[in-house]
Structure formats: C-alpha cells, structure tokens
Image (cartoon, rainbow, N blue to C red):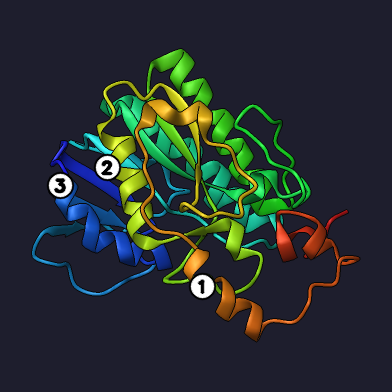
Amino acid sequence: MTIKSHNRILLTGAAGGLGKVLRQSLKDNCNHLRTSDLAAYGPAHPWEEIIQADLGDDQAMDHLLKDVNAVVHMGGISLDGPFEPILRSNILGAYNLYESARKNGVKRIVFASSNHVTGFYRQSETITASHPPRPDGHYGLSKAFGEDLSRFYYDRFQIETACIRIGSSFEEPRDRRMLASFLSYADLHRLITACLTTPVLGHSIVFGVSDNSVTWYDNAQAKHVGYHPKDSSDPYREAIFEKTPEPDLSSPSVQYQGGAFVSAGPFGLK
C-alpha cells in the first residue's frame, strides 16, 4: 500500500515520457500533486495542480516550490545533444531547483539521475555507488553535476536527496542492452515511494533498475532506502534474443554500459 507521506509533492518534467506515467501514480503519495513543465501537456487531472515553469528561470522556480513538501525532479533534457540547451535546462535548472528548495524549506528531493553518469564503464563490469562517475556525454555530465550539487545541498543545508540513476524505463525492454538496464513503470513508482517514505534518506545514490538477472549495478549501499523491485526483464529474454541480431562485440555501444550514448555527438565540441 502506498502511503500519503506528504501533503504537497511537486513533479517536474510532467510532459515527458516518465512524467506522464508519474502524473497518474504519484497522486497516491500525497494529498495534493503539483506538476510542471515548460511545455504544455493538457488539462489538469482532478487531483492535480499545473504550474507551467522554465527550470532556467529562478523566479519561476521560487514560485513553483512554494508550499511544497517534497520534489520528484524529472524535468530537463533527457537525451544527449548540444551543450547549451543542456546547460540551461539540466545544470542551471538543477541549481535553481535546489536554491528554491532551500528558500522554501523543502527538505526531500528525488532527483532523476541517469545510468549515463556511469556510461563509460564496460558491460562486463558490476559497479556500486562508490565507483567514480564516468559520463558518456553532455547529458550524463549534467546528471553528474546534479548529483554533486545535491550532495552539496545536503551537506550544507540538510536537504535530503535520492539520486536515482534511472536505467531504461519502459513498458517492456526493447533490446539486449535493456536486459540489464530495464526498470518497469511499476518499479519506478515503488522506488520513488521508497525514497519518499524511508525515515532517514540522507544523500543516497540508487540504481533505478528492476530485479533483472543480468545487471551491471549493485544496490547494496542503498539498502536503507527500502526499495524492493517486483518486476524483471527476464520474462522478455527469449523474445528479445529471437528478434535481435547477435551483438557486434567491437562496437562501443556493445562494449560500454551507456550504449549508443558513448559514440553520439560531437555536438559542436571545440
């Protein structure tokens, strides 16, 4: 059973793929759900308050976080690309979010980080939260910044954060890589619920994956969060092997955990 642990939760990035899913499920975690995005995403549900806001606008963020008890931060650019848009949305936007949280007395944030923070580890490796970041692009770099930023705001201002390094969250895994990185929608909500309700969160890094037999991630350091996935990529394994070709082991997208992100670009790098 999901506990209504907070009076008002803010969900950013509500127009995105996972934001649309969480607009439905997070209503069970609070009395009032406030959602936001820069893009329009239709009329409000009966349980929902919509405030359209730009993460790069500090005054808009101050208004957005007023009277909020916790934040599920899914907002920002979710694909790799040129640095400038990612700078405004993911880096400046994360700073504005945390600074507004500090001003408004918000003490718990669930931060959507990414497996692309560690995308340059090999698929033959198993990593923990103690492994240093190895971002695979501008997007992964921005999420590594967000993790460091959240650590600073915890150490300095006691704002607790769970950095969820989301793997591949879809209705079902789509390829062989996702046998290791798959996170079901239901497990995503279970993980966010655990982060919102654990008595002492501190600053925690949690790998956002389901209970997959094939995995690159060891979540032992996040036991205190209380996340217990119930879904798995395993039932899809046979079908995925039948419909996908043998992997080219010389390809960087097969060698590294970040998949295609490791060779994307160069997006105007100088």
Q: Is residue 86 left or right of residue 267?
A: left
Q: Position of residue 176 (x, y in %)?
A: 65, 69
Any part of residue 54 in sight: yes
Nearest to the eye among marks 2 and 3: give it.
Answer: 3
Q: Are marks 1 and 3 in contact (CB under 8 Å)?
A: no
Q: In the picture, residue 192 is in which quadrant?
A: top left
Secondary element at tag 1? helix
Give how far apart the Cα atoms at labels 1 and 3 are: 27 Å
Give the residue type at disc 1.
Answer: Tyr
Give the residue type at disc 3.
Answer: Met
Q: For mark 1, what is the residue? A: 236
Give the residue type at disc 2.
Answer: His
Residue drawn at x 31%, y 48% is 190
Q: For mark 2, what is the residue? A: 63
Q: Is residue 207 left or right of residue 104?
A: right
Residue drawn at x 54%, y 30% is 149
Q: For mark 3, what is the residue? A: 1
> Foreground residue, 209 or 147?
209
Q: Position of residue 228 (x, y in %)?
A: 36, 43
Q: Position of residue 244 (x, y in %)?
A: 68, 81
Q: In the picture, residue 175 is in which quadrant?
A: bottom right
Q: Are marks 2 and 1 in contact (CB under 8 Å)?
A: no
